[in-house]
Image (cartoon, helix red, strand yellow):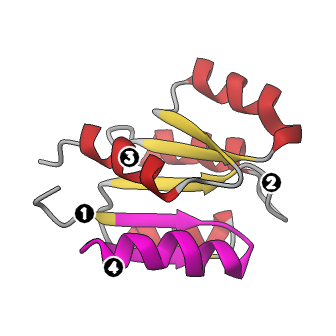
C-alpha cells in the first residue's frame, strides 16, 4: 500500500495495541490506539479516520454498540470487527448490520494488509 492511512484501533488489551498497532505503524500508517468505545468516540471528534478496527468484547461499550454509534457519526468509515472464538455469532450479526469485515483472534498480521488494500480513502 502506497498511501498512509489514519487508523483507529479500539481494544482493551495492550498486547493488541502493541502487536496490531505496532505492525500497522511499522507499515507506514498512523494509528490511534484506544482502550474502549468511549475513547474511540472522543477520538473521532477531532480527527477523520480511514478505517477502524474494533474489538467485539470491551468493558463499558461492546464493539457492536460502538459500530452502531460510528455509523451515525461517520457512516462512510469502514469498520472491521475483531472477534474471539466465542464471539462469532455477534460478528456475523455485525456483518449483517454493515461492518466491512471481521477478523478472528488471534489476528494474522498479513490479514490486515489484505483488508487495508481494499480501502480507498478520499
Spatial CA span between label 1 and label 3: 16 Å
Indicate left or right for 14 with 101 as reference: right
Spatial CA span between label 3 and label 2: 21 Å
Q: Residue furthest top?
A: 96
Q: Residue at x 51, y 25 (%)?
A: 98
Q: State the SS at label 4.
A: helix
Q: Give whichever of discs 1 and 3 has the lower sequence position.
A: 1
Question: For the residue carrying disc 1, how many other residues have a C-alpha within 10 Å: few (<14), some (14-19), or many (20+)?
Answer: many
Residue on which the image places disc 3: 74
Q: State the SS at label 2.
A: loop
The picture places residue 11, in percent across and down from the top left corner, at: 67, 67
Q: Residue at x 69, y 41 (%)?
A: 64
Q: Give whichever of discs 2 and 4 has the lower sequence position.
A: 4
Q: Residue at x 47, y 44 (%)?
A: 79
The correct choice, above or below, for 64 with respect to 15 in the image is: above
Spatial CA span between label 4 and label 3: 26 Å
Q: Give whichever of discs 3 and 2 has the lower sequence position.
A: 2
Residue on which the image places disc 2: 57
The picture places residue 54, in percent across and down from the top left corner, at: 60, 54
Check residue 89 for magenta coloring: no
Question: For the residue carrying disc 4, how many other residues have a C-alpha within 10 Å: few (<14), some (14-19), or many (20+)?
Answer: few
The correct choice, above or below, for 24 with respect to 97 in the image is: below
Q: Which residues are magenta?
A: 7-33
Instruction: Say which mark, if any, is on residue 47.
Output: none
Determine which quarter of the picture holds residue 88: top right
Indicate left or right for 119 with 88 as reference: left
Residue on which the image places disc 4: 26
Residue on which the image places disc 1: 5
Amino acid at each position: 500500500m502506497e498511501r498512509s492511512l489514519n487508523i483507529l484501533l479500539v481494544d482493551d488489551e495492550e498486547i493488541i495495541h502493541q502487536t496490531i498497532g505496532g505492525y500497522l505503524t511499522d507499515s507506514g500508517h498512523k494509528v490511534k490506539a484506544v482502550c474502549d468505545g468511549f475513547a474511540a468516540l472522543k477520538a473521532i471528534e477531532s480527527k477523520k479516520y480511514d478505517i477502524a478496527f474494533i474489538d467485539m468484547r470491551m468493558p463499558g461499550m461492546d464493539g457492536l454498540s460502538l459500530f452502531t454509534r460510528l455509523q451515525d457519526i461517520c457512516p462512510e468509515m469502514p469498520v472491521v470487527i475483531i472477534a474471539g472464538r466465542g464471539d462469532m455469532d455477534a460478528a456475523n450479526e455485525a456483518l449483517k448490520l454493515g461492518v466491512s469485515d471481521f477478523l478472528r483472534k488471534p489476528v494474522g498480521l498479513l490479514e490486515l494488509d489484505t483488508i487495508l488494500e481494499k480501502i480507498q480513502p478520499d
